[in-house]
Image (cartoon, rainbow, N blue to C red):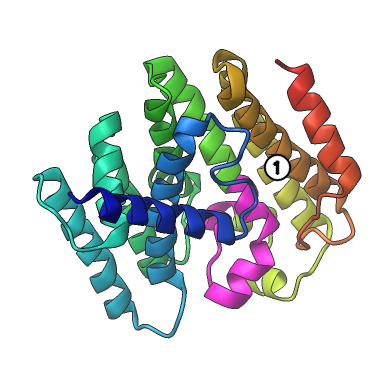
Amino acid sequence: MNKETLKSAYAECLHMAQSHYENFPVASRLLPKHLRQPIAVIYAFARRADDFADEGDLSNEERIAKLTDFGNKLELVEQGQEVDDTTFIALADVIKQHQLPISLFHDLLTAFKMDVTKTRYANFGEVMEYCRYSANPVGRLLLHLNNAASPQNLGYSDAICSALQLTNFLQDISQDLDESDRIYIPLDEMEQYGVSEEDIRNKITNQASRDLIQFQIQRTRKLMQSGAPLGKVLKGRMGLELRLTIMGGSRILYKLNQQQNDVFSRPRLSKWDIGWVIWKALRAK
């Protein structure tokens, strides 16, 4: 591979990572310098695939076809063949250098295909299966990059990543339904608490919806806490970055819990909240 071509591929992935807004920083300057480019490449892969699943006016068949093409390109990378695609040029180098399990990238594609084909979840088990493919691979890849992918750390990471995904669902309940016709709250739990799809669509806050969302928040908080020890296991900048992410997610859950008059609105972190997150992350080292 031509060095200039590879350098250009990395630069394009880094630009993509730094130019998109996300809830939590991507390739942050807090991360060890040698990991910023690999993380940016992983982000670029996931960002492009996510756009195939969600953006534009493509039909579902076209979305699946593009995601399948990404999967085929991954298989070529696994076989050691060059792929004429900037993201995959950089990705192949990252996978080779860091010995990353390519199955984790296929898992991400599985989640994006689910975004196209699945809009309701019968129970919490189905939601967690989605998290297994959509969120957990990211944490596992970061551990592999950090040479810290022990069985215990992988378990901690899965708990954190699933909790962050659930937190994202809880802050985007109305948006997911209005824009994508998706509901990630388990249907059996909605029925149990007496909350209908129309209640969510009309953003009706009553005791039933409060109780339902409160249950979701408490379960998510416990899951986040079960993985939190990883923030102390990982040292240096990676540990700090993870603690900031955990505390940021925890703060969003706190803000969600305070919205008793409108359980379907999206909470915003104030400067004071951000200060609290930073203070807690530093104090927990």
Residue wearing tag 1: 217
Give the percent coordinates (x, y) of residue 197: 62, 70
Give the percent coordinates (x, y) of residue 229: 60, 17
Q: Which residues are magenta?
A: 166-189
Give the percent coordinates (x, y) of residue 45: 37, 55
Q: Is residue 45 visible?
A: yes
In terms of depth relative to the viewer, which is nearer, 175 or 140?
Answer: 140
Left or right, residue 216 beside residue 99: right
Q: Secondary structure at mark 1?
A: helix
In terms of depth relative to the viewer, which is nearer, 36 or 228?
Answer: 36
Quadrant in the picture for the C terminus: top right
Point 39% across, 48% down: residue: 41
For residue 22, above or below residue 63 = above
For residue 242, above or below residue 125 = above
Point 60% across, 18% down: residue: 236
Left or right, residue 42 beside residue 231: left
In terms of depth relative to the viewer, which is nearer, 229 or 90?
Answer: 90
For residue 181, above or below residue 245 = below
Q: Is residue 255 magenta?
A: no
**Disc 1 packing (10 Å; few <14; some 14–19; many ≥20):** many
